[in-house]
Image: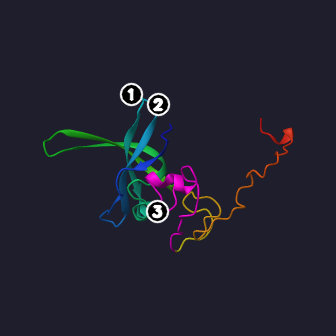
Amino acid sequence: MINRVVLVGRLTKDPELRYTANGIAVASFTLAVNRPFSNQQGNREADFINIVVWRKQAENAANYLKKGSMAGVDGRIQTRSYDNNEGRRVFITEVVAESVQFLEPRGGSGGNRDQQGGGYGQGNEGYQQPPNQGSGNQGGFGQGAQGGQRNTNDDPFASDGKPIDINDDDLPF
């Protein structure tokens, strides 16, 4: 059996962090994910998907994500039900995240993505390294996102105006 979900979207509000009676952190938030097609009026609709994340990743999500932040979620769908105050059965479908990736530099979200390098998750200028985290690939920012400095030699495929010489034997197809 396979139960796997991969989503990329924006948070509709700040994550809500709680702790169980045993002291285990759990955070919940809603991710707005655009549909891949437009409606009859030419507008793109979105699905609003409930996400639950546990333990250290829950604390990280609550500390570093906020309303409007773009995030990637890898997890599984889970359903549960309960009886509400009126005695009606309520069914809940949510994604239990196994991994949450921060897809924007800290402080960057929503309307300022063009200032971050022209696209989602590109540009590390606004990134500030979380405390007590080593250097290198943090939160999906790629190499060179160290202490807010960007190394321009990170991209081995950067165009220098010359064609790339690749042997046909090196291609996987």
At a point 67% along the width and 65% down the height, the residue shown is 151
Indicate the amino acid at tag 2.
Answer: Phe
Q: Residue at x 53, y 68 (%)?
A: 128
Query: Residues at badges 3 and 1 in contact (C-beta under 8 Å)?
Result: no
**For residue 120, side relative to residue 84 (left or right):** right
Q: CA distance from mark 2 to mark 1?
A: 11 Å
Callout 2 crowding tier (Cα within 10 Å): few <14, some 14–19, many ≥20:
few
Mark 3 and mark 2: span between their CA atoms?
30 Å
Disc 1 element = loop
Q: Is residue 139 left or right of residue 93?
A: right
**Is residue 111 part of the magenta span, yes or no?**
yes
Residue designated by label 2: 37
Q: Is residue 138 left or right of residue 163?
A: left
In this picture, which residue range is highlighted in magenta?
104-131
Q: How many marks?
A: 3
Instruction: Write down the quadrant of residue 65 in the picture.
Output: bottom left
- Return the x and y of residue 43 as percentages of the image width and height: 41, 33
Q: Amino acid at mark 1?
A: Gln
